[in-house]
Image (spheres, helix red, strand yellow):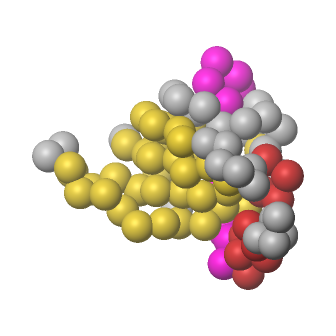
Amino acid sequence: MPFSGLDGSLIATFGEDVEFTPYGSSDVEEVLVIRIDPVQLANGALLGLFGTVADSGFSQAPAKNDTFTLDGTDYRAFEVLGPDAIGGYRISLTK
């Protein structure tokens, strides 16, 4: 696949460290993700993240109800799409 290394390059260049806590766990880990376009819904603005298990440093694949802490604020993953063909996950967050 000609694009197989693209996710890792994008994450390394544009990624930021956030705290990740898998649902049902108290273990907090730092992962490297990219903020993507926020989605405006009736209940307010939501954040979007993009990452891969291999390049972001997740100990496990992100899943619904995982917690992400950005800028001191906790968000809950309400939708996780992926992995795509080269391992990418799109994570939609709400408070």
Residue closer to the observer: 82 or 31? 82
Taking the view exactly as shown, the residue that stands out farthest to the front is 1
Residue at the (71%, 75%) spot, across then down: 10
Q: Is residue 7 left or right of residue 43?
A: right
Give residue 56's quadrant in the image.
Answer: bottom right
Report the number of numbered marks.
0
Instruction: Find residue 54 and report its horizontal and vertical position in percent.
Output: 85, 52
Q: Is 85 placed above or below 67 here? A: below
Q: Which residues are magenta?
A: 14-26
Residue at the (60%, 32%) spot, across then down: 63
Instruction: Find residue 47 and report its horizontal and vertical position in percent.
Output: 41, 56
Q: Is 68 placed above or below 55 here? A: above
Residue at the (46%, 56%) spot, across then down: 48
Instruction: Find residue 35 and report its horizontal and vertical position in percent.
Output: 53, 66
Instruction: Find residue 1 and report its horizontal and vertical position in percent.
Output: 82, 64
Q: Is residue 78 left or right of residue 82?
A: left
Residue 16 part of the magenta-drawn span: yes
Give residue 67's quadrant in the image.
Answer: top right
Residue closer to the observer: 13 or 22? 13
Quadrant (top left/top right/bottom left/bottom right) for the C terminus: top left
Taking the view exactly as shown, the residue that stands out farthest to the bottom is 13
Residue at the (55%, 51%) spot, across then down: 90
Residue 9 part of the magenta-drawn span: no
